[in-house]
Image (tube, grey):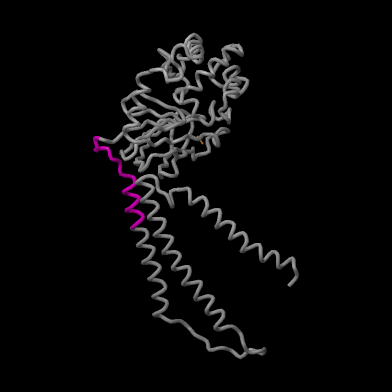
C-alpha cells in the first residue's frame, strides 16, 4: 500500500474523531447534558433514550457483521470450493422485520406523547407570566405581562415560574430560539405563536434568531437573564419607577448626558429609564443598552462606548436606511450621552 492511500485511509478515523470531539464539546454546553428548563429536560430524556437504543442496535449489528466477516472469511486458497448455500429462514426474517418495527412504533409513541406535553400551555395557571416577543430586522423586543415594562435584546425571566411567550414579528419571518431552554418557535408577521417553558436555575443563556431573515440575521442574538422571582420583581419595579439608575443621579457626570437626551427628544422614539417622558415605541427601548452585545440591529457588532458614540453621531452613515436620524451631535454632546447610556445596565 503506498503512503498516499495510507494517508487517505487514516484521514477517515481522524475526521470521525474530530467530529465526535466537536459534538461532545458543544453538547457539554447545551441542553443535552445541562437542560436549563423543564422543556429541555423532556427533550434531553428523549434524546438519551433514543441514543442508547440506537447504540445497542448499532453495536449488535456491527458486531455480528465483524464476527461474520472474520469467522467466515476465505481461508482456503483458490480455487474456491463453494460453501453451503442457504435459501431463506422464515423465523429469522419475521423476527428482523418485527423487532425493528416494534422499536420504531414504540419510539414514535413515546416521542408523540412527550412532544404533545411540550406544546401544552399553562394558560390556566394564575402564576404564569406572559411575555410578548417581537422580532424585527434585526433585534428582539420583549414585553412583560401587564407591567408595561419592555426590553430589547435582553430577556429577563424569573426562574421556576411558567412562562408563556407570545411570539410575533414586525416585518419578515424570524424564529425565536433559546437552545438551552428548548424554546423555539417561528415569529411570523400578523400572527401570534405561543410557546412555554420554565427556567430551572438563575443564569445567563444565549438566544438566537433561527430563521434566515436578511443581512443582519447572524447578529440577531439576545441574552436571557434568568434570576430568582424576587430579583426579577425588583428589576421590573426599577424599570417601572423610571428612577435613574444609581450612576445617573443629579450631580453625576452622566447627568449631563441624561439632560441632553431629554433635550434632543430621544424619548419620542425610545423608552429610556431615568429620562422623564421617554416612552417612545418607534425605536428599541434603551433599558439595559449598555449590556447589549450589539447595537443598531447588529450594524454595530461590538457595543463599545467608542462604537456607540460613532453610531449616535451619524446613524445613517453607519447603517444606511436606518430610521434613526443624524441629530447633529457635537463630539462633546455625544461623549456625555454615551456616558449616560453606559449607566443603563
Ligand atoms: Cu431574524 Cu434571522
- Quadrant position of residue 70: bottom right
Estimate the x, y position of residue 293 in percent, counting from the top left: 53, 31
Residue at figure coordinates x 37%, y 24% from the top left: 149
User: Is residue 118 in the magenta section?
Assistant: yes
Q: Position of residue 41 (x, y in %)?
A: 37, 50
Residue 281 visible in the displayed image: no
Side of 139 where 330 appears, left or right: right
Q: In the rendered view of the protein, which quadrant contains the N terminus?
A: bottom right
Residue 244 in picture, x, y percent from top left: 41, 17
Q: Which residue is nearer to you in this view: 176 or 335?
A: 335
Question: Residue shown at 50%/18% (left/top)?
Answer: 340
Depth order, front residue of 97/133: 133
| Residue at image point 39% right, 37% down | 226
Q: Position of residue 5 (x, y in %)?
A: 72, 67
| Range covered by the magenta-colored residues | 110-126
Look at the picture and state if 279 lies above or below 171: above
Is 112 one of the magenta-colored residues?
A: yes
Residue 106: quarter of image: bottom left
Residue in view at x 39 percent, y 48 percent = 40
Tell me if 35 is positioned left or right of 85 in this view.
left
Amino acid at each position: 500500500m503506498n503512503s498516499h492511500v495510507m494517508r487517505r485511509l487514516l484521514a477517515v478515523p481522524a475526521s470521525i474523531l474530530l467530529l465526535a470531539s466537536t459534538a461532545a464539546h458543544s453538547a457539554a454546553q447545551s441542553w443535552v447534558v445541562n437542560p436549563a428548563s423543564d422543556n429541555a429536560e423532556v427533550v434531553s430524556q428523549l434524546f438519551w433514550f433514543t441514543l442508547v437504543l440506537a447504540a445497542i442496535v448499532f453495536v449488535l449489528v456491527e458486531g455480528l457483521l465483524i464476527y461474520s466477516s472474520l469467522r467466515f472469511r476465505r481461508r482456503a486458497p483458490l480455487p474456491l470450493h463453494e460453501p453451503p448455500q442457504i435459501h431463506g429462514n422464515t423465523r429469522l426474517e419475521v423476527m428482523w422485520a418485527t423487532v425493528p418495527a416494534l422499536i420504531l412504533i414504540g419510539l414514535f409513541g413515546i416521542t408523540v406523547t412527550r412532544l404533545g406535553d411540550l406544546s401544552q400551555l399553562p394558560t390556566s395557571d394564575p402564576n404564569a407570566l406572559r411575555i410578548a416577543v417581537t422580532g424585527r430586522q434585526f433585534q428582539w423586543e420583549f414585553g412583560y405581562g401587564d407591567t408595561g415594562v419592555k426590553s430589547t435584546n435582553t430577556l429577563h425571566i424569573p426562574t421556576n415560574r411558567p412562562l408563556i411567550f407570545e411570539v410575533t414579528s414586525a416585518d419578515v419571518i424570524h424564529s425565536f430560539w433559546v437552545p438551552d431552554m428548548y424554546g423555539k418557535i417561528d415569529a411570523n408577521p400578523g400572527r401570534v405563536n405561543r410557546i412555554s417553558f420554565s427556567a430551572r436555575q438563575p443564569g445567563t443563556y444565549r438566544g438566537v434568531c433561527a430563521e434566515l431573515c436578511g443581512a443582519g440575521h447572524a447578529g440577531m442574538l439576545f441574552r436571557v437573564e434568568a434570576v430568582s422571582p424576587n430579583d426579577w420583581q425588583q428589576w421590573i419595579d426599577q424599570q417601572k419607577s423610571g428612577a435613574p439608575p444609581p450612576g445617573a443621579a443629579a450631580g453625576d457626570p452622566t447627568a449631563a448626558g441624561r439632560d441632553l437626551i431629554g433635550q434632543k427628544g430621544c424619548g419620542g422614539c425610545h423608552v429610556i429609564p431615568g429620562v422623564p417622558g421617554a416612552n417612545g415605541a418607534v425605536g428599541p427601548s434603551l433599558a439595559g443598552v449598555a449590556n447589549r452585545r450589539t447595537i443598531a440591529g447588529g450594524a454595530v457588532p461590538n457595543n463599545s462606548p467608542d462604537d456607540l458614540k460613532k453610531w449616535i453621531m451619524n446613524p445613517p452613515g453607519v447603517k444606511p436606511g436606518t430610521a434613526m436620524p443624524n441629530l447633529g451631535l457635537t463630539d462633546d454632546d455625544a461623549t456625555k450621552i454615551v456616558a449616560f447610556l453606559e449607566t443603563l445596565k
